Amino acid sequence: MNLEQEILKEYDLNVQELKLLRHNENMTYKVLAEEGEYVLRIHQSVEGMSLSMLMGEAKPEELISGEMQLLEDLCQNTDLGIQRPVRTGQGSW
């Protein structure tokens, strides 16, 4: 089983199609499921790449979690049409 399929098992979706849209530091997929359309972003750090100059000592996991919380807050508290993060069945981003 590949990484995308492994990750999608964390969500209660009946996936019909998975299409790679872009691959840079994030692999971005369009997910078509019976429940709707989604974007799957898988963050994979590139060996040797460091953003420490921009983010100090913060761990990448903390930054990603902060980004997801910010997006969630914007979705709940504004009328902006932005992507809404979806937690896994275990509650993680």
Image (cartoon, grey):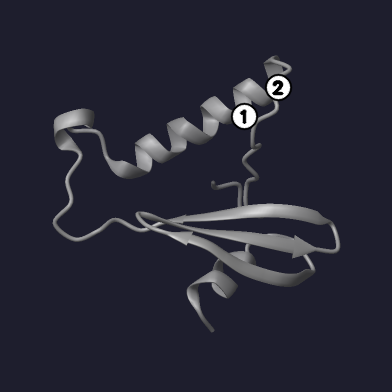
Is residue 90 toward the left or the right of residue 14 in the image? left
Disc 1 crowd rating (10 Å Cα; few below 14, some 14-19, many 20+) is some
Q: Position of residue 51 (x, y in %)?
A: 20, 39
Circles 2 and 1, Cβ within 8 Å, touching? The answer is yes
Q: Which residue is mark 1?
A: 72
55 or 29, nearer to the observer: 29
Residue 79: name its quadrant.
Answer: top right
* Residue 56 in view, yes or no: no
User: Mark 2 highlights which residue?
Assistant: 76
Task: Relative to 39, say whether 58 is above or below.
Answer: above
Q: Amino acid at mark 2?
A: Gln
Residue at disc 2, secondary structure: helix
The residue sitting at 66% across, 37% down in the picture is 84
Displayed quadrant of residue 36: bottom right
Would residue 76 be seen by someone viewing this image from the given angle?
yes
Q: In the rendered structure, which amino acid carries the disc numbered 1?
A: Glu
The spot of residue 32 in percent (x, y) is 75, 63
Give coordinates of residue 74: x percent, y percent: 62, 21
The residue at the point 53 percent across, 30 percent down is 69
Indicate whether 4 appears above or below 47.
Answer: below
| Image location of residue 35, percent across then percent down | 84, 57
Q: Is residue 22 above or below residue 68?
A: below
